[in-house]
Amino acid sequence: SWRCAGDGPGLFFPFDAAVASMFEQALPTKSPVTWQSRGFNYFVDWSTMEQVNMANSTRRGIERVVGGRVTHPDPTPSWRCAGDGPGLFFPFDAAVASMFEQALPTKSPVTWQSRGFNYFVDWSTMEQVNMANSTRRGIERVVGGRVTHPDPTPSWRCAGD
């Protein structure tokens, strides 16, 4: 079966049989899948195991469950960078993602080059920073279709803290 993440921790909703069947057929080759539900059009971003709302780019994790165990998404961490629109993210290549993984536990400095620009990670804000013009873009670590860094848990503090 296939299910989609809801708005609360551990909350999932099953996809209907027709959509689940499309996912099963597309999974081996990660071929494109689009569908409509409740008046919205969606597609699957296989790189992050998320359904994406085509109108507003809202993303929600999806999972494949077989015999009571989650078999997909792959638990291998991936990293992505914020794009120019709300909810738009682009995956980092494997070499950069590997550097991030190695540096994460100690928040060690990471620098890299991409498309002719040099960048570093600002771990305090979870952003990549362009060394030439100081442009900042959020970065995220995704494991099993869920953002693990920055911490997605809301925090509250009182004025004056």
Image (tube, rainbow, N blue to C red):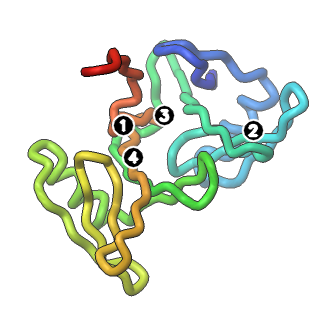
Mark nearest the camera among 2 and 4 is 4
Residue projecting furthest to the front: 160
Residue indicated by mark 4:
140
Pointer 1 or 4: first along the chain: 1
Pointer 2 or 4: first along the chain: 2
Q: Amino acid at mark 4?
A: Glu
Residue indicated by mark 3:
72
Residue indicated by mark 1:
75
Residue indicated by mark 2:
22
Q: Position of residue 11 (x, y in %)?
A: 55, 13
Q: Amino acid at mark 3?
A: His
Q: Quadrant of the N terminus?
A: top right
Q: Amino acid at mark 2?
A: Met
Q: Going 57% across and 48% down the picture, which residue do you hit?
A: 46
Q: Is the residue under label 4 in contact with that under label 1 (CB below 8 Å)?
A: no
Q: Quadrant of the C terminus?
A: top left
The answer for how far apart the CA atoms under marks 2 and 4 are is: 28 Å
Left or right, 93 with respect to 29, comes to: left
The answer for how far apart the CA atoms under marks 4 and 3 are is: 19 Å
Q: Going 77% across and 21% down the picture, which residue do you hit?
A: 16
The answer for how far apart the CA atoms under marks 1 and 2 are is: 22 Å
Circle 1 packing at 10 Å, graded few (<14), some (14-19), many (20+), is few
Q: Going 42% across and 82% down the picture, which residue do you hit?
A: 115
In front here: 49 or 7? 7
In front here: 86 or 8? 86
Mark nearest the camera among 4 and 3 is 4
For residue 60, above or below residue 139 = above
